[in-house]
């Protein structure tokens, strides 16, 4: 009963219980207990799990690309973002890492004064995999990947 009262609804505590069953601790469980996570699903703009956003593997003792991950958003860790409820979204480790890789490369090229069209060309030339469902980077995709 304390969990339901803390989260405001019984459904919220079930998300916390699902996270705990996967071996998740910390800010994601706290958010679920408070009713700040409504369902167990990857919240990244691009999710890559072949079974969909709601499929997660348990958190292992070694890295697992489909385990739940707390993604620093909207302020990335590299920009001073903290793992606190107002700066976290739930993701798969793989989706989080892939997004971080894109942003790092795009940020570096933007800082060099490159246009988003130029950046798309660079990413395509380097063979950086674009968002699933597409086979090439475009200027619009670069901008969306960077700001989402």
Image: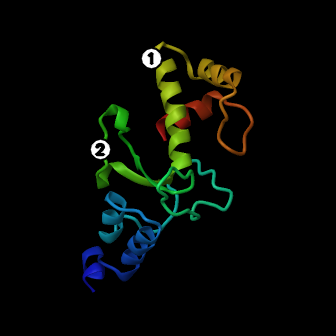
Query: Residue 140's quadrant in the figure?
Result: top right
Mark 1 or 2: the one toward you:
2
**Residue 99 percent location from the top left of the image:** 53, 40
Crowding at label 2, few (<14), some or many (≥20) Cα neighbours within 10 Å? some
Instruction: Return the residue found at the far bottom.
Output: 1
Instruction: Return the residue found at the far right.
Output: 135
- Residue occupying image coordinates x 40% and y 69%: 20
Check disc 1 and report its element: helix, strand or loop.
helix
Q: Say which residue label 1 marks.
A: 111
Q: Is residue 33 left or right of residue 136?
A: left
Q: CA distance from mark 1 to mark 2?
A: 23 Å
Q: Is residue 44 left or right of residue 1?
A: right
Q: Say which residue label 2 marks.
A: 82
Mark 1 or mark 2, earlier in chain: 2
| Looking at the image, residue 55 lies above or below residue 91 | below
Query: Residue 144's quadrant in the figure?
Result: top right
Crowding at label 1, few (<14), some or many (≥20) Cα neighbours within 10 Å? few
Q: Is residue 130 left or right of residue 43?
A: right
**Residue 105 percent location from the top left of the image:** 52, 25
Instruction: Return the residue found at the far top.
Output: 112
| Looking at the image, residue 6 lies above or below residue 44 | below
| Looking at the image, residue 129 lies above or below residue 71 | above
Q: Nearer the viewer, residue 138 or 73?
A: 73
**Residue 57 percent location from the top left of the image:** 55, 62
Q: Quadrant of the N terminus?
A: bottom left
| Looking at the image, residue 143 lies above or below residue 8 | above
- Residue occupying image coordinates x 55% and y 62%: 56
């Amino acid at each position: 009963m304390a969990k339901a009262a803390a989260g405001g609804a019984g459904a919220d505590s079930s998300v916390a219980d699902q996270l705990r069953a996967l071996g998740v601790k910390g800010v994601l469980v706290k958010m679920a207990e408070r009713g700040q996570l409504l369902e167990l699903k990857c919240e990244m703009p691009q999710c890559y799990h072949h079974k969909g956003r709601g499929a997660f593997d348990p958190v292992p003792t070694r890295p697992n690309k489909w385990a739940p991950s707390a993604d620093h958003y909207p302020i990335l860790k590299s920009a001073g973002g903290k793992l606190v409820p107002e700066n976290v979204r739930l993701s798969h480790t793989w989706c989080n890492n892939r997004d971080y890789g894109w942003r790092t490369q795009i940020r570096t090229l933007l800082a060099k004064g490159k246009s988003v069209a130029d950046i798309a060309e660079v990413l395509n030339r380097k063979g950086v995999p674009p968002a699933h469902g597409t086979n090439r980077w475009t200027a619009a995709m670069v901008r969306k990947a960077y700001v989402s």
